[in-house]
Image (tube, rainbow, N blue to C red):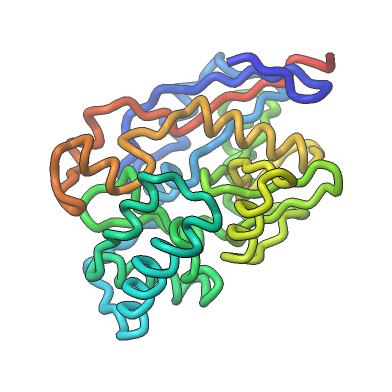
Amino acid sequence: MLKKIGKYTILAKPVKCKYWKPGTNIVKYLCKKLKNKVKDGDIIVFSEKALATALGAIIDESEIAPSMFSKVIVFLLMRVIWGYMLGILTKLKKETLEWIRKYPVAEGAAHKQLALILGGLLQVLKPSSEAGIDTSNLPYSYASLPLNSCSIVEKLRKTLSKCLEANIAVMIVDSDRTYYNKKYSIALSSRKTCVKGLINLGVLSYISGRMFRAHFKPKATPVSYAGPCMSLELMLEIAEIADKVRGVGAGRTVFEMARRFNTSLNGVTWEMLSSINHYPIVIVRILGKN
């Protein structure tokens, strides 16, 4: 995909890979997969969820015992407040409102309990992607955990640059939205990141960004970056274009995923996920200024 972003022309190429299960040696895999395919200045953009899964940063939510607070949150906050009030106010899609109004109490309570532990109340109050936790494109009741360690991206850059014999940059991206106001250079993120300039206000960022869409443009969230200095605006644009070209795998949500495989919410298997195309990395190349 070729796209002009401001004064830059950007080439983004998704790389088809096998499904990365926990324990996948991604460095060894990518050193072989990308040999002679990258050059100095290229940016390798990782899907945070795919990377977290390969690194084993996942958890089985069926083993979490939800508190009464989490159960109340699911019923009142999700089904009622988000389903019939905030969801309409923030102009959520009709299909999104439908699954929120049918949000499963048992599974949802465990998910909210995990979000409370990892991110606190401002994350729990979000309707989805709480604290960077993601359940799509994972089997059974597994959820990927956020890669909040800022050292991961630098280690990946050093290791891959060495084996690929190219001075590359590395970015880790979450499809969860950051809302960006270009005029005032304000970027409202609803989760923790390692990128300077992103303002994490949890659910407040989510509500503000969606309510004032005339002033804030939604972009994929760069979780961390290692490489030459880059403006926040360009980083957000690269994160967004990479997120678009990689696609959604088995689905954007567990509900889409279950429909695709014609199974229950917890019925998706590793084998099912391995049967479809996955693009966990995107090679981004800045061709030059316009």
Q: Is residue 47 left or right of residue 187?
A: left
Quarter occupied by residue 289: top right
Q: Position of residue 181 (x, y in %)?
A: 77, 46
Residue at the spot 85% in from the left edge and 43% down from the top edge: 183
Q: Is residue 164 above or below residue 67?
A: above
Q: Is residue 149 above or below residue 66?
A: above
Q: Residue at x 69, y 39 (%)?
A: 236
* Residue under the point 68% across and 51% down: 212
**On the picture, is 9 further left or further right than 80?**
right
Depth order, front residue of 238/44: 238
Residue shown at 35%/58% (left/top)?
100
Could you tell me if residue 113 is visible in this image? Answer: no
Note whether 17 is above or below 189 in the view shown: above
Residue situated in front as seen by the camera: 36 or 71:
71
211 vs 174, nearest the viewer: 211
Q: Is residue 210 left or right of residue 113?
A: right
Count of residue discs: 0
Q: Quadrant of the C terminus?
A: top right
* Relative height, residue 103 to residue 52 (above, below): below
Q: Nearer the viewer, residue 209 or 142?
A: 209
**Can residue 272 be seen at all in this image of the molecule?**
yes
Across and down, in percent, residue 213 comes to: 66, 46
Residue 271 horizontal/vertical position (percent):
17, 37
Check the picture and name the quadrant holding the N terminus: top right
